[in-house]
Image: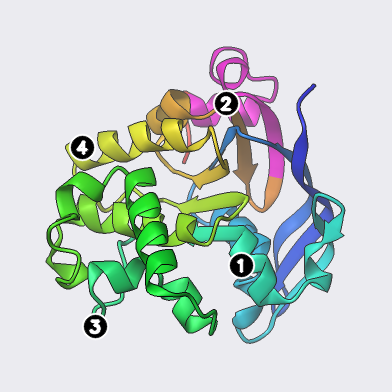
């Protein structure tokens, strides 16, 4: 039996009067990679920004309906508590430029005023960098700036920073779109490893990527969830003509 980690119920999001997400109902399952795909402007990024409550930081942005993390309504949680449980990795690698690799990994603790002793910090840094398949490449240069790393390494550093907080869910917004094919392949391999410990949601416009790494795929179009299924079914036997048209390249 698949266990549900996150559930959206009749969920809507707005920017001012613009209705960006329309009545989204979806269950996200534990230790699975769920891909959210669809053409530009269909609401994919807005949806994951709602999951860790970044959406509401935009002036005029509002939501209706519910998103539950297990049984907790995320809109009744303190955003800081929620963001510890739902780590986010963005489209462009964004290590904090003034911080070393080491400081970047534990930034979530520092910025939230969580006190750790040196041994705890060292353990978190090593565990997180090992988890992001970066430790062997940086263990001798931990006190160099994170911005010295290559693009692919920077993105893995951002993943290490996200998993350092021991989240339940990892949200990745087009996390490989700024990377070269080799770095993209290494991040995809990493995701397959990380799903043993985390529930992962990736927003991607790259259908091949969704097909390669995800267990489930959700297809969004004009703010609506058109279809949601096992990835294999979605790509071989989509039920909705709009999904079929998108997958075969007739629009998008």
Q: Nearer the viewer, mark 2 or mark 3?
A: 3
Q: Which residue is mark 2?
A: 215
- Identify the mark at residue 98; answer none if there is no mark: 3
Q: Quarter-wise, where is residue 60 in the image?
A: bottom right
Say whether disc 2 or disc 4 marks the residue closer to the N-terminus: 4
- How far apart marks 1 and 3 lie (CA) works out to 22 Å
Note whether residue 160 is visible.
Answer: yes
- Is the residue marked by circle 4 packed among few (<14), some (14-19), or many (20+) residues within 10 Å? few
Say whether disc 4 or disc 1 marks the residue closer to the N-terminus: 1
Q: Is residue 1 magenta?
A: no
Q: Do the numbered discs 2 and 4 sit on residues whose CB atoms are within 8 Å?
A: no
Q: Residue at x 68, y 67 (%)?
A: 82
Note whether residue 90 is visible.
Answer: no
Q: Which residue is mark 4?
A: 181
Where disc 1 sits, the SS reads helix
- Identify the mark at residue 83; answer none if there is no mark: 1
Q: Residue at x 66, y 70 (%)?
A: 53
Say whether disc 2 or disc 3 marks the residue closer to the N-terminus: 3
Percent of width and height locating residue 65: 86, 62
Q: Is residue 162 found left or right of 7 in the rendered image?
A: left
Given residues 225 and 111, the one toward you in this image is 111
Q: Quadrant of the N terminus?
A: top right
Where disc 2 sits, the SS reads loop
Q: As displayed, is residue 94 above or below residue 136?
A: below
- How far apart marks 4 and 1 lie (CA) works out to 30 Å
Where disc 3 sits, the SS reads loop
Say whether disc 2 or disc 1 marks the residue closer to the N-terminus: 1
């Amino acid at each position: 039996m698949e266990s549900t980690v996150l559930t959206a119920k009749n969920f809507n999001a707005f920017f001012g009067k613009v209705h960006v997400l329309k009545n989204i109902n979806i269950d996200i399952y534990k230790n699975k990679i769920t891909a959210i795909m669809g053409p530009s402007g269909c609401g994919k990024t807005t949806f994951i920004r709602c999951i860790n409550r970044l959406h509401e930081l935009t002036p005029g942005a509002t939501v209706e309906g519910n998103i539950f993390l297990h049984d907790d309504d995320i809109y009744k949680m303190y955003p800081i508590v929620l963001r510890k449980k739902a780590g986010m990795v963005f489209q462009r690698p964004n290590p904090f430029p003034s911080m070393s690799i080491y400081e970047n990994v534990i930034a979530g603790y520092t910025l939230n005023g969580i006190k750790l002793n040196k041994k705890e910090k060292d353990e978190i840094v090593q565990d997180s960098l090992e988890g992001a398949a970066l430790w062997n490449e940086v263990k001798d240069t931990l006190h160099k700036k994170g911005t010295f790393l290559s693009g692919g390494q920077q993105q893995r550093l951002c993943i290490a920073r996200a998993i350092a907080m021991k989240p339940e869910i990892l949200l990745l917004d087009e996390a490989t779109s700024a990377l070269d094919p080799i770095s993209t392949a290494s991040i995809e391999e990493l995701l397959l490893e990380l799903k043993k410990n985390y529930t992962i949601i990736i927003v991607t416009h790259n259908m091949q990527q969704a097909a390669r790494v995800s267990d489930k795929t959700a297809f969004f179009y004009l703010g609506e969830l058109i279809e949601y299924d096992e990835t294999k079914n979605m790509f071989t036997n989509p039920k909705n003509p709009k999904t079929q048209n998108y997958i075969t390249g007739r629009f998008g």
